[in-house]
Image: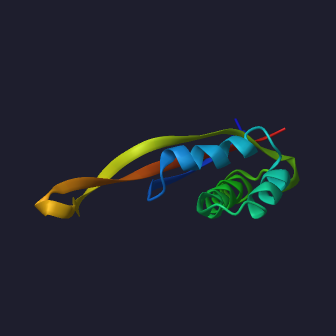
């Protein structure tokens, strides 16, 4: 039995899940070539990380499962919240606050048409 899909995951990427979801929603259901073109023309920092995960998923499909690259499309892609890195923020009048640096888990699954 042949596998018809391949997956790649980037864990604890230091970009907010909300910002990352805006970009990942653009490539869902598209062919791999079309998704690459979309990501290449996005100015956001998240698009570079998502592009690397897409390349990894494509390489996994081609090298590990023998799929043809021209037949691949983005079957599913999603962003989950990862841990929150908490830092102290010093305010005026001796007060302190908290800076929350949110992180993301990015998952992309590619499959053959």
Q: How far across and how far down the image is residue 86, in percent?
A: 26, 55
- Judged from this view, the residue extending furthest toward the left is 94
Residue 94 on image: x %, y %: 11, 62
Q: Relative to 26, is 36 above or below?
A: below
Looking at this view, name the residue that lies furthest to the front. Answer: 93
* Left or right relative to 36: residue 80: left
Furthest-right residue in this view: 70
Question: At 68% across and 41% down in the image, what residue appears?
Answer: 25
Residue at point 69%, 63% (across, down): 43
Which image quadrant for residue 3?
A: top right
Is residue 11 placed above or below 76 in the rendered structure? below
Residue 63 against residue 5 in the figure, above or below: below
User: Where the C terminus falls, by quadrant?
Assistant: top right
x then y, percent, for residue 82:
39, 46
Residue 56 visible, this orientation = yes
Counting labels gives 0
Residue occupying image coordinates x 48% and y 56%? 15
């Amino acid at each position: 039995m042949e596998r018809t899909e391949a997956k790649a995951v980037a864990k604890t990427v230091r970009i907010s899940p909300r910002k990352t979801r805006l970009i990942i929603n653009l490539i869902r259901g598209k062919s791999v070539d079309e998704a690459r073109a979309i990501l290449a023309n996005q100015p956001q920092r998240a698009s570079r990380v998502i592009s690397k995960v897409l390349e990894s998923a494509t390489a996994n499909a081609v090298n590990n499962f023998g799929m043809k690259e021209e037949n691949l499309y983005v079957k599913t892609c999603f962003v989950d919240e990862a841990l929150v890195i908490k830092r102290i923020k010093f305010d005026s009048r001796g007060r302190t606050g908290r800076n929350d640096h949110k992180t993301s888990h990015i998952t992309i699954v590619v499959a053959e048409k």
